[in-house]
Image (cartoon, helix red, strand yellow):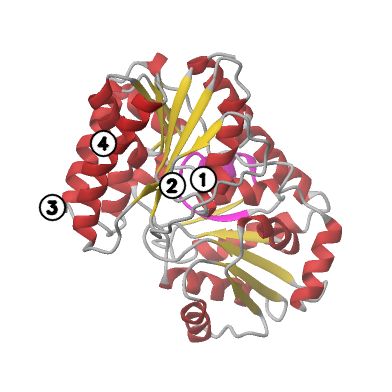
Amino acid sequence: MRILFIGFWGISDPLTTSTTMPNLQILQGISTVETIVLATVERDEKEDIQFTPSFTNHKIVFRPLISRTKQPLLLNKIDDFVRLPRELAALVRQYDVDTIIGRGAMAGALAYQTSKRTGVRFFVESFEPHADYMLDSGVWKAYDPRYLFQRRWEEKEKKLAKGLMPVAENYRRKLIEEGVPADRIMTVSCFVDLQKFAFDAERRQQMRRQLDFPNEAIVGIYVGKFGDIYYDAEAFDIFRAAADHFPDRFRLIILTPNPIEQVKAKLQAVGLNETNTFVTKAPHREVPAYLAAADFAFAPIKPAECRQYCSPVKVGEYWASGLPVLLTEGVGDDSAIIKEEGGGAVFNLERPTSVGDALQLIEQQIALPDYRTRVRQLAEQHRSIEQAKQAYTRFFGT
């Protein structure tokens, strides 16, 4: 089997590191797989883009696709979805590819178009209703060509893909209701590296000393950006609520790609300063150490009907480190898991007392001496790499 694997994020993007690389490692271990041509969409327009996986590579050939970002946004997107399928089709012919995999619905759109040009079968993993995500988040409008085309391509993916791997069981059921045959669907939640994110007590002490956080501090952490599908101003109000709930003891870590000074200004606007907060942009390899220093985590995701079909990577990483998660109600399968099995608390900003009630539950959970072990079991059960291995074995062999 010769696979063309399409990623819509650049090779150095944290999402590629945390989600694509483990999948490539699984595929590489399948005996029937001869070659994997990895094509990622690069937006920095660099001439020298390197592929340096953390695992031993013996089957993967890296072929970056350059997105021409030095033009208006709409023209850039049109160019991506007109030119890149031609380049991908050329790779199919060059490497005699017989299987195409798109990572996510946007890459799935490229996979569909490449399949249409070449006749090669395609699959979409990490399949979500991306067009609806962007519409409900206010990033795209209903008349936006990006929304209209992505929505159309997702319908083509549902109809023509040989296999779909949605990230939430909620979405698998929805796809079946829409008429997609059940034997073409297998849920694969966004899994995490359980070993990499395992809690380390020594690393916790080292990081707290580095941050100058006292041992008795209650530390919350947020990893990710603000805006788009995530709360922005509301997230800082939630941080303030946590500070009020744990007076004098609360400390906050934020790891974000957003401009650091802007984030600090928003923290100051809600009364949080540099004595009780730490903000930085950290490479993915450093995230586990920061998680070890924390006691619980934030996942302030904007609510929307389509959000029940997602699987936030950050929630799995939080759980793997043993952190209870303060999560928006109605997110993926995770909100229901938290309600039924613990591992955090859910909130709904339409209910004024819900954040305070959720923080009270968090406080009760972190008071338990073995809470990190209990929470980690959720990652082991719901975010294990075994889901992906089972799906790949089913679709691609052993």
Is residue 337 found inside the magenta-colored segment of the image?
yes
Q: The magenta stretch spans which residues?
A: 325-342
- In space, the residues marked 1 and 2 are separated at their CA atoms by 6 Å
Where is residue 326? Give x, y as percent. 57, 57
> Measured along the vertical axis of the image, is residue 134 above or below residue 176?
below
> What's the residue at 76%, 73% (across, down)?
217
Which tag is nearer the camera, tag 1 or tag 3? 3
Does residue 324 appear left or right of residue 265 in this picture? right
Does residue 304 appear left or right of residue 293 in this picture? left
- Residue that numbered label 2 is attached to: 330
Residue contact between numbered discs 1 and 4, judged by CB atoms under 8 Å: no
Could you tell me which secondary element the residue under label 3 belongs to?
A: loop
- Residue that numbered label 1 is attached to: 335
> Measured along the vertical axis of the image, is residue 208 above or below residue 141?
below
Going by the numbered disc 2, the residue's amino acid type is: Gly
In the picture, the disc for residue 143 is 3
